[in-house]
Amino acid sequence: MRRSNGTVTRDLLLPDHDAIGEWRRLRARLAYADRPASAAALATLARTIRRTVISTISGAGLGHTGGDLSVTDILSTLYGAVLRIDPAQPDWPDRDRFILSKGHCSVALYTALTTCGFFPAEALRTFAAPMSPLNGHPSRRAVPGVETSTGPLGHGLPVGVGVAVGLLLRGSPAKTVVVLGDGELQEGSNWEAAMTAAHRRLTSLTAIVDCNGLQQGARTCETANLEPLADKWRAFGWEAVEVDGHDHLALLDAVTAPRGALRPRCVIARTVKGRGVSFMEDRVEWHHKVPDAEQARTALEELR
């Protein structure tokens, strides 16, 4: 998966047209489905992503299992029912822009992209292999569907604000969605970006906080307490709503509800790190721990 000169470029991961067809049929069904049917379809998609996350990280011997599992329901909701994108044309000018600021949770993002057909699911077997485009942190240059390279925490929202401003200046109808971890909100760059977004009345911008209460090595509140988090966003001029981050319909409602004022919106999604696997849930060690073969088998069984 590289050119003869050794450089990695994003055109080496080609669209999977069968997967694109399945994804388009899912989107068409969800457009007319009732709420129970929508919830069931998104839960099925999330379960598929979680199982693939476990298999991919276990096979590679590398990854951020806990955070991947906590953000899965957010990603399944966005890619299953919200984002205006075209996997067959990743650079469609009026596509919605999605930025995963917590870029260390790349496996969940890559898996979500394969469910849409941006590239074949078989490519996940190369995750973290030498010269693979699917690195531990997503690369804009190497992976179709990735809008900006992320990894250094605290950068995703500032980039998202710049993207939203650019789209506004172009008169584009595209929206920008940024998913952040709660731990990275301890960095001042996010709050500078939040001030700028409110000042510019970026109603096309949504920030979703994957608020699982844990970061590398400790609980978030032990490092720097963020609460009352919703009040902080409101004080910076944003709309703020708190939801269960594993409730697909609550997430869908929070992201798509009409804007009541000329403000950007923050959705604080209360999640559980390691969601869906009993021995991983709310355990700080699973921030960067890889399941062994037996743990992976147990996890996959629990995620059936």
Image: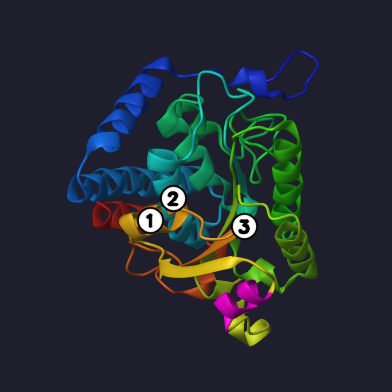
Q: Nearer the viewer, residue 282 or 185?
A: 185
Provide the major secondary structure of the magenta segment: helix
Residue 148 pos. (x, y %): 70, 40
Q: Which residue is mark 1?
A: 253
State the SS at label 1: helix
Residue 242 pos. (x, y %): 46, 70
Residue 265 pos. (x, y %): 57, 60
Would you say 105 lies left or right of 138 here? Answer: left
Q: Which residue is mark 2?
A: 256
> Do the numbered discs 1 and 2 sit on residues whose CB atoms are within 8 Å?
yes
Q: How many marks?
A: 3
- In the image, what residue occupies the spot 30% across and 46% down? 42
Q: Kindly indicate the quadrant of the structure image that contains residue 132.
A: top right
Q: Which residue is mark 3?
A: 262
Q: Nearer the viewer, residue 55 or 262?
A: 262
How crowded pointer 3 is (Cα within 10 Å; few <14, some 14-19, many 20+) is rated as some
Q: Which residues are magenta?
A: 228-235
Q: Closer to the N terminus: mark 3 or mark 1? A: 1
State the SS at label 2: helix
